[in-house]
């Protein structure tokens, strides 16, 4: 029975392939169409093109405060990351809790140091980008931009990166400098762009 499944799967893939190439060989012609999918139009691509780079140049309009974010965190995030942001290992990582030992930035040799937002993340814009695309786990991408700004403000304030009274918008978030940005060493493969 174990050998039958892979053979059945292989036969199904060959049948779906749409025929051999013009020479009858096993390699399909580059122009062969399989009748699957559709061309991606500009509107579809725009909906997916939501990533935010370190400069924050593509941050959307909106605003949020840490106080608003605290309410959202309790409702949307605490079930996985814990009420205090300490995580629920092994599945859900710790978000908050800067460790004074992290100032030595010995993450490569001390794997027990928590890689929390304030300890380890090099850019605040990355936090916004990740929350916007991937959270909450049960409904990724469902938060409004205002809600993402609020959650970002709450998490940064809770980890002592920004004052608790800060209101984040595109300009304010792009201006946030994370505590250990300068401790990262960028590889040549990452390009020579200025990361400050």
Image (tube, rainbow, N blue to C red):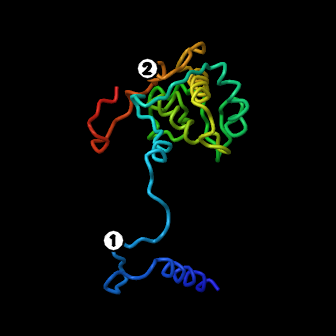
Residue 75 lies, with reference to residue 2, above or below; the image says above
Residue 118: % across, % down: 52, 27
Q: CA distance from mark 1 to mark 2?
A: 48 Å
Residue 112 lies, with reference to residue 59, above or below; the image says below
Task: State which quarter of the image contains the N terminus.
Answer: bottom right
* Number of residue marks: 2
Pick the front one: 33 or 15: 33
The image quadrant that residue 31 belongs to is bottom left
Q: Residue at x 59, y 40 (%)?
A: 141
Q: Residue at x 44, y 50 (%)?
A: 41
Task: State which quarter of the image contains the C terminus.
Answer: top left
User: Pointer 2: what residue?
Assistant: 175
Residue 150 lies, with reference to residue 36, above or below; the image says above
In-image side of 190 versus 114 (left or right): left
Local SS, label 1: loop
Local SS, label 2: helix
Residue 69: % across, % down: 65, 24
Q: Residues within 10 Å of mark 1 (few under 14, many from 20)?
A: few
Q: Residue at x 38, y 33 (%)?
A: 184
Q: Residues within 10 Å of mark 2 (few under 14, many from 20)?
A: some
Pick the front one: 37 or 153: 37
The image quadrant that residue 99 belongs to is top right
Residue 13: % across, % down: 51, 78
Q: Residue at x 48, y 32 (%)?
A: 121
In-image side of 162 versus 147 (left or right): left
Q: Earlier in the sequence, mark 1 or mark 2?
A: 1
Residue 101: % across, % down: 51, 28
Whether label 1 touches label 2, CB < 8 Å: no
Camera-side mark, 1 or 2: 1
Disc ID at residue 30: 1
């Amino acid at each position: 029975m174990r050998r039958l499944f892979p053979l059945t799967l292989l036969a199904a893939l060959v049948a779906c392939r749409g025929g051999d190439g013009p020479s009858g060989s096993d390699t399909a012609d580059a122009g062969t169409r399989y009748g699957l999918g559709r061309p991606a139009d500009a509107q579809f691509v725009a909906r997916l093109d939501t990533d935010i780079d370190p400069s924050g140049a593509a941050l959307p309009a909106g605003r949020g405060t840490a106080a608003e974010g605290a309410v959202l965190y309790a409702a949307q995030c605490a079930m996985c990351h814990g009420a205090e942001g300490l995580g629920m290992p092994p599945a859900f990582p710790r978000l908050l809790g800067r460790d004074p030992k992290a100032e030595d930035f010995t993450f490569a040799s001390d794997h027990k140091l928590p890689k929390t937002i304030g300890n380890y993340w090099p850019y605040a814009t990355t936090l916004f980008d990740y929350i916007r695309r991937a959270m909450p786990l049960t409904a990724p991408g469902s938060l409004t931009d205002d809600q993402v700004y609020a959650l970002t403000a709450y998490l940064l304030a809770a980890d002592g990166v920004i004052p608790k009274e800060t209101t984040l918008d595109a300009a304010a978030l792009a201006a946030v400098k994370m505590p250990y940005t300068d401790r990262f060493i960028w590889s040549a493969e990452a390009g020579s762009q200025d990361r400050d």
